[in-house]
């Protein structure tokens, strides 16, 4: 709990100091100001699938870079075989266009990859990726 409170205070301080305030997916009008940041987390439970996971996200990143509105993309390994994917879009409409893009849907992640429930509405769950803890599934 203390870590969450400290993170929230740091976030408020960053916004107060002029850092960009990101909109959370689904919480802002389409014709609004500000950028949108989406974060999703994954656990690769089968070590032999880690390279394939990275390759699929590399393909997705290449496709995203060709889309209108992508500001940044980052794939981070935050713990052994635990990954965080963050992408920032210029507008919510640009992000939604990526969400509804057919190539995004046909680039399925490999078996042995599980997603973690997005925190604070910072991401949208993958449609065809099981949850690490099924009890937490929003579906």
Image (cartoon, helix red, strand yellow):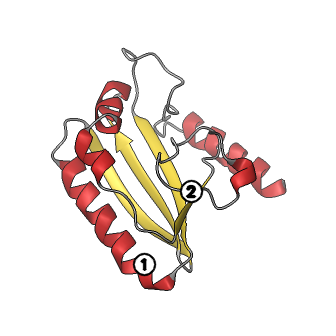
Point 45% across, 41% down: residue: 37
Q: Residue at x 30, y 55 (%)?
A: 107
Work out whether mark 1 precedes mark 2 in sequence or the reverse, and give the earlier one: 1
Query: Does dot 2 land on a helix, a strand or a loop?
Result: loop
Does 55 sit left or right of 114 as displayed? Answer: left
Compared to 18, does 30 lie above or below? above
Residue sitting at 57 percent across and 76 percent down? 45
Q: Is residue 102 above or below residue 33?
A: below
Placement of the C terminus among the 4 image quadrants: top right
| Nearer the observer, 51 or 94 | 51
Q: Indicate the position of residue 119 as horizontal and vertical percent values.
A: 64, 46
How many badges with numbers are in the image?
2
Instruction: Determine the residue positioned at 27% across, 56% down.
Output: 61
Callout in the foreground (1, 2) = 2
Tell me if label 1 and label 2 are in contact, CB under 8 Å. Answer: no
Callout 2: 10 Å neighbours few (<14), some, many (20+)?
some
Secondary structure of the residue carrying numbered label 1: helix
Residue 33 position (above or below residue 96): above
In the foreground, 10 or 74? 74
Task: From this view, report whether residue 70 is shown above or below residue 55.
Answer: above
Q: Nearer the viewer, residue 125 or 61?
A: 125
Residue furthest right in the image: 1
- Marks 1 and 2 sit apart, C-alpha to C-alpha, by 16 Å
- Across and down, in percent, residue 63 comes to 20, 51
| For residue 33, side relative to residue 80 (left or right) | left
Question: For mark 2, what is the residue?
Answer: 130
* Residue 33 marker: none
Residue 50: give its label: 1
Q: Residue furthest bottom?
A: 48
- Residue 48 at x, y percent in the picture: 44, 85
């Amino acid at each position: 709990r203390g870590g969450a409170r400290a993170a929230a205070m740091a976030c408020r301080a960053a916004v107060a100091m002029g850092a960009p305030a990101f909109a959370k997916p689904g919480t802002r009008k389409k014709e609004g100001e500000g950028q949108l940041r989406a974060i999703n987390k994954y656990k690769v439970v089968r070590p032999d699938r880690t390279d394939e996971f990275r390759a699929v996200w590399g393909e997705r990143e290449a496709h995203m870079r060709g889309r209108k509105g992508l500001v940044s993309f980052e794939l981070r390994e935050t713990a052994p075989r635990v990954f965080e994917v963050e992408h920032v879009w210029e507008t919510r409409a640009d992000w939604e266009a990526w969400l509804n893009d057919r190539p995004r849907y046909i680039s399925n992640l490999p078996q042995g990859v599980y997603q973690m429930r997005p925190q604070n509405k910072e991401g949208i769950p993958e449609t065809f990726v099981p949850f690490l803890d099924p009890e937490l599934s929003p579906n």
